[in-house]
Amino acid sequence: MGLQSAEPHKAAISWGLKIKRKTKMVAPCLGMFRPTMGQCCHQCTPESLRNKLEQNSWDGFRNILSINEKHTRFRGWLVRRLCCVLFVSGCEVFPSPATDRVERVYQSNRVKEALAAEPQAEQGQIGCLPTFLPLINTCISSGLTRFVGWLFLKMLASVFGSVQVSPNHLPALHKASQEGCPLVYVYVRQSALDCALISLALFCHSLRVPYTICPVKINNSLLRMILQKVGVVLLNGDLTEEEFERNPLSSAVMISLVCELLHEGQAVSVAVSAEPGQGEQWLARIRQLIKEGSVPDVSLVPVGISYSCVPPADPQIGLSSVVKRLLSLLWTRSWGSVRIDLAQPFSLKEMCDSGRCRVDDWLPLQDLLLPVILNNRSESANGCRRMSWLLPRHYASELKAHHQDDLSVAIILHLLHSATSCQSVMSTSVVSSLLLHRHRKGVKLSVLCRDLSWLTEELLFRNKDVGFGGTLSRVVHYSLSLLSPHLIMAAAPSRKDPLILPRPSPAAAHHLSLQAQTVTHAFILEAVGACAVSAMLSEVAVSGVSSRVRSDGVDGAEVKGDMEFDVVLCQTELTNRALQLCHLLPPGFMPPCQSSHSFALDAVDSLVRCGILIMEQVPKGVPICDVWKREGTFSWTTSDDPYNSDSDCEEMESRSYKITQPSQCPDLLFFLCSLLSGYLRSLCWATSSLETLLSPLPEADFKTQMHCQLCDMARKKKMHYESCSVEAVHTALRTLIDLGVLLEKQEKEGVFLSVSSLFHSSENRQKLHRFVSQYLYNYHI
């Protein structure tokens, strides 16, 4: 079945205005083939890369919710009414009984050592593990799996318009499973439905249903029993993943259970997140099993899940809440469509043993940036930011003692980037990105249609797949219908072109920002390069020198507010600005196998490819802006200056750039800068609020106070609410800790945060604030 267009019959616009029909089509692909995403890393896993994915044809997608008689072996009137039951009964299921798994887990050395440390344990008794028996006995029942699969197909059909899967990616998974290597599916956690969608997609294509490590708390015992019969591994009690792992006996039982599942050849599904203690430790445990030789190898499969509208998260589920949710579906609107992209499998053993995964130049963030921030240095240290905090503290210290933490973190970062990169861009993501980053003050509907067509083409040119297609009017109608609770639409009676703008509320800004993240990931190179250009241009404007440089070499008059920056930018300084911003990026944006300097060079080159910069051949006598910070002054040099040093000439002659079409370029430049403005603004606000926070404080209390401070700043400005979300506060605090601005101290009561003595000085805080705010082109707005 082909990729379905937008579904206007399931989306109703409450404001009652109609979109004028247009014949222009939004192309879902370029030419006859769609972009191929999800290939293995050519540097870390070249052997796995040889098993290439098939090219995605124009109609290479299947809606697994659309079941008809063609999907069965039978035909007829009765078959058309029972086709879903017949389809489910025909899907292949690989049952996995627990049998003697309890005995094997109990006999493992890890569990024996953990039991020996327990004072209440009785030697030689399996009854010492009564609370872990349901966990260990998790299995896959053939009959119950088919019933739950049928139920989910019926339930999701009322929730989503479609769930699209590409059959072209499935032969690689079938081949990898036939080779006897267990598959480990890795996805980025978004909602409680993530793991269910992956299992359902694999079940519908007769692939082995994975055992899913699920952190969601299930209160009802009957619901827990059903889920444990279909391969859902539920943690005991009300403990979080990190609390469960901190218990030595729980940790030993869990890693032994994963080891036994992989020995049986079972598939496993785990989630990763940019926050510590939310699934990353399971990948580190699997890598530890391979290093010990307990498991020969596994094939990692990054999975990208793209929602037109992300379902609300529900960390605690009971039977009553499930029933209420099912009943509410009878009168609630659809959540749109879903795309599931299964990437190419690659060998974890190859990645670990080959030594190609880069971990040799990892440095603490304060070593990379503090000399630049506090000492006005122009060059930052080459290297990558160390993010050991992605693993739980107790487990990270255990790995650090064996010098294994960097490689484990590199694998986590690699999978975070891979799973995010293979996500398709949905139509709501494109519209959210345009409204949030290009037309925050409102846009006419005709202009929105034009920009949606332009941005879709730009995404396809960057080999990013999109999860929509059809006429321009239907795509826009469908997207605005799903986003309508977060938008304001106004139209004068005499005008047919309505005005659309985001609602000025925290919920609306957070939802649009969440939807726009896939677009930000697609344009991350251009966004970093644009912020670097913006930082250099802002220094030109602050210097008071005219931004227009005359060809006769005469210095320009002092002007303010001139937007036509007709200057020549030095490549070395531009690359250094981009490199410094790379160190501040949250996890998942940069591939860990690429050096930060190489990424910064690519960011500058990407601006040349998209037409913002052109390479400039500088004639003698023309001033060149290199924006070096020499004794706090702004430096201008000429190419025939006799007092210029040889090193400066070499750098100056290497390559220089000029901004193209100064009167038209700012729209595109500012759009790219705005893609990272939410994160950078939250970091600026967090820095400004340090002087008002009491410290030391427990980590949770510190985050709460910081969140309140950022919310107050957003309310005063009545905009930029996306910079005060819980996720933004967490990311900003993590960056400040890595920079050494905040200090972590482990106490008996928990972790306490306090401001470093180095940043008790208002001067140092202002230096940090200026360093971050230079990348925000509209920070004071």
Image: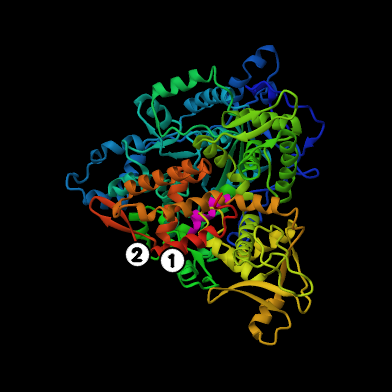
Q: CA distance from mark 2 to mark 1?
A: 22 Å
Q: Main secondary structure of the magenta part?
A: helix
Query: How far across and how far down the image is residue 441, in percent?
Result: 63, 40
Above or below residue 90? Residue 40 is below
Question: In the image shown, does 780 or 408 lie closer to the viewer?
Answer: 780
- In the displayed orientation, state which residue is furthest to the top: 77
Assess disc 1: are there few (<14), some (14-19) or many (≥20) residues with their C-alpha within 10 Å of its C-alpha. Answer: some
Identify the magenta region: 410-418
Q: Using residue 621 as the reference point, say whether residue 712 is left or right of it.
A: left
Q: Using residue 183 as the reference point, say whether residue 134 is left or right of it.
A: left
Q: Using residue 159 as the reference point, say whether residue 263 is left or right of it.
A: left
Q: Which residue corresponds to mark 2?
A: 401
Q: Is residue 747 visible?
A: yes
Q: In what quadrant of the picture does the N terminus appear?
A: top right
| Helix, strand or loop status at disc 1 | helix
Q: Amino acid at mark 2?
A: Ala
Q: Earlier in the sequence, mark 2 or mark 1?
A: 1
Assess disc 2: are there few (<14), some (14-19) or many (≥20) residues with their C-alpha within 10 Å of its C-alpha. Answer: few
- At 51% from the left and 73% from the top, the residue drawn is 377
Query: How far across and how far down the image is residue 48, in percent?
Result: 61, 56
Above or below residue 460? Residue 337 is above
Q: Which residue corresponds to mark 1?
A: 366
| Helix, strand or loop status at disc 2 | helix
